[in-house]
Image (cartoon, helix red, strand yellow):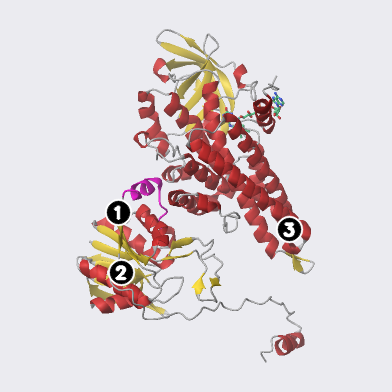
Amino acid sequence: MSQDLYQAPDYFLMDELLTEEHKLIRDAAREWVKREVSPIIEEACQKAEFPKQIIKGLGEIGGFGPYIPVEYGGAGLDQISYGLIMQELERGDSGIRSTSSVQSSLVMYPIWKYGSEEQKMKFLPKLATGEFIGCFGLTEPDHGSNPGGMVTNIKDMGDHYILNGAKMWISNSPFADVAVVWAKNEEGRIKGVLVERGMEGFSTPETHNKWSLRASATGELVFNNVKIPKDNILPNKDGLGAPLGCLDSARYGIAWGTIGTAMDCYDTALRYAKQRIQFGKPIASFQLQQKKLAEMITEITKAQLLTWRLGVLKNSGRATTAQISMCKRNNVDMALNIARQSRQILGAMGITGEYSIMRHMMNLESVITYEGTHDIHLLITGMDITGENAFK
Amino acid sequence: MNILVCISSVPDTTSKINFTDNNTKFDSNGIQFVINPYDEFGLTKAMMIKESTGGKVTIITVGNATVEPVMRKTLAIGADYAVRVNMSAIDSFSTATEIANYIQENNFDLIIAGRESSDYNGGVVPGMIAEILGLPFVNACIDMEIDGDDVKLIREIDGGKEMISVNLPIIIGSQKGLVEESELRIPNMRGIMQSRSKPLTVIEPISTMLHTNTISFDKPEEKGICKLVDADNVSELVNLLQNEAKVI
Ligand SMILES: Cc1cc2nc3c(=O)[nH]c(=O)nc-3n(C[C@H](O)[C@H](O)[C@H](O)COP(=O)(O)OP(=O)(O)OC[C@H]3O[C@@H](n4cnc5c(N)ncnc54)[C@H](O)[C@@H]3O)c2cc1C
């Protein structure tokens, strides 16, 4: 990839809504991405390899559970700080942000919120530094949008449980040290189970040949009579609400993250349009290109304001599942459209790895699918405003 | 070792610079401020010395409250104390006088300032401080080794290098080479959290008298559009230079 010339657009002086510390955290993440992610990400994607060498640095800049309290190894930051870190990471690549979101919101969050004190002390500090990598197993081959139908199950054997079943499309699974797995007990109640690498009967085959999120490892979790100590069950919450609570946190991170990709695509397209000469003029001087660019910055600005407001609500514990869902849906769609429009502005150059746009565009196809598809989020808003369930 | 690093808060180098009030004042609207790049090399060197030989790193900035975010960043990078002299740094001599006064009241073994600041490019503050305090001053340092009180410095000179030996206390002007760009530090989360409780002290200036007065600023003329002339078409080139650019 050519040199990273990124300059973040801030059309409505949104920075004035942030604290000095927010900006310090954001700028540190931004600098880190420029230095550590941009130079290596294209090759990692082309080779479909997760760049493991960045894990330590990712932990240092707050990529793993920044809002987890300090006593558990987190940084005790607010939700806007978390959002800003996600924005900067996804500006680099959605795959890097995915690794970070999964670790923060889908692994550390449930252990922190639903785990015992021993579980918190055992896992959280190591997850915060990246010494441990975690993954989150909810989706199954036959249960994607409808996770409540899951068949993965645990049986009580007296002094332990036996876990059987399989999870699919699991980010970080191929090298995770611990998996937060959702499984039904004999009464059909969903429980959170901490499955550790090395447990007998537990394997994590990698999913190959993806055209999207190529710098993030995806795989399966296969459980064949895995013996689970009773201490590895998350004691403090069960039912579908438990995994859905994690999804709220992760979707919130995605809402911020995708603004990052949109800003990167817009910034690249704007710079290119000013420099690329056709018919004796920069293409930025043609109305058709200006329409694209003007609409992009408008949509980015709207998303920035919506998401900042969501952050304020989340900080005060008032953000609802439906609000987070609306924001995730809006922002991913906005980013995907901007990626497609920017790619056209770059003409043939837009399809190459010289620029980040095509990579972002392909990544966003996963982002618009995971953590609730674009359709499912519409149904969440629909149900929230009408009171009618259109899922089934 | 007790180290003082002088830090200026300057517009990010990619900023679009404008002036207001009849070209007499810098327009800071929408400008992102960063640590002066020359100072950042010095700060990084100070952190390295502290890590290898122990000691304390203090940073000092002459400026109004708007410079504090940049100062907070230096604390997040690892400086121990920050001091702000509450006065706009518009005049080099008064800035140098304030810093010299602080140095006189607090003992430092090593004082590092950027070779120049990337905003006004005066390049005289560290030299003036040295003069006021009667300290040795070596500018444009690209290497420094300290052994007890002995300091070996390498200074960039036009087309070459100068090797210098000097004793502490000294003041040096830092630039790229003293540390490499890849060694510059990005504040990590631990540093940012620690910086919350590190002291940032504000002191009042001893004198607010300015020795110079800016009348106005002029921006360089915008670069014209570049015209490419075919290598074979010398007469066209001569024609353009004569009649359009009017330079020959
Ligand atoms: C790269 C990647 C990483 C992932 N990482 C993880 C992970 O770490 N952990 C994890 O648990 N999962 C993960 N997932 C899985 C992801 O969450 C699911 O793919 C997603 O929930 C959709 O499920 P599905 O693929 O089975 O699609 P389906 O549920 O089969 O949906 C197919 C289509 O039908 C539509 N549809 C479904 N139900 C309805 C309905 N009621 N009304 C209208 N339309 C409907 C959907 O919108 C979609 O368009 C990941 C997926 C990808 C691609």
Q: What element carries label 3?
A: helix
Question: Mark 3 is on which residue type?
Answer: Gln
Q: In which quarter of the image is ligand 1?
A: top right
Q: Do labels 1 and 3 share a chain?
A: no
The subunit carrying tag 1 is B
Dot 2 beta carbon under 8 Å from ligand 1: no
Q: Is mark 2 on a helix, strand or loop?
A: loop
Q: Where is residue A209 drawn, in percent x and y?
A: 65, 36
Q: Is mark 1 on a helix, strand or loop?
A: loop
N-terminal-most mark, 1 or 2: 1
| Residue A208 occupies quadrant | top right
Q: Where is residue A389 drawn, in percent x and y?
A: 68, 21
Find the magenta span and give its range. B184-197
Between the C-alphas of marks 3 and 2, the distance is 51 Å
Of badges 3 and 2, nearer the viewer stands: 2
The residue singled out by tag 2 in the image is: B205
The residue singled out by tag 3 in the image is: A290
Question: Mark 1 is on which residue type?
Answer: Pro
The image shows residue B72, relative to residue B134, as above or below, that is above
Q: Is residue A25 left or right of residue B219?
A: left
Between the C-alphas of marks 1 and 3, the distance is 49 Å
Quadrant of the snapshot with the C terminus of chain A: top right
Between the C-alphas of marks 1 and 2, the distance is 19 Å
**Residues marked 3 and 2 touching at CB (< 8 Å):** no
The residue positioned farthest toward the top in the image shown: A158
Q: Where is residue A231 drawn, in percent x and y?
A: 39, 18
Q: Which residue is drawn at 41% across and 15% down?
A: A230
Q: Can residue A94 be seen in this view?
A: no
Between A314 and A1, the residue placed more toward the observer is A314
The subunit carrying tag 3 is A
Q: Where is residue A314 drawn, in percent x and y?
A: 51, 36
The subunit carrying tag 2 is B
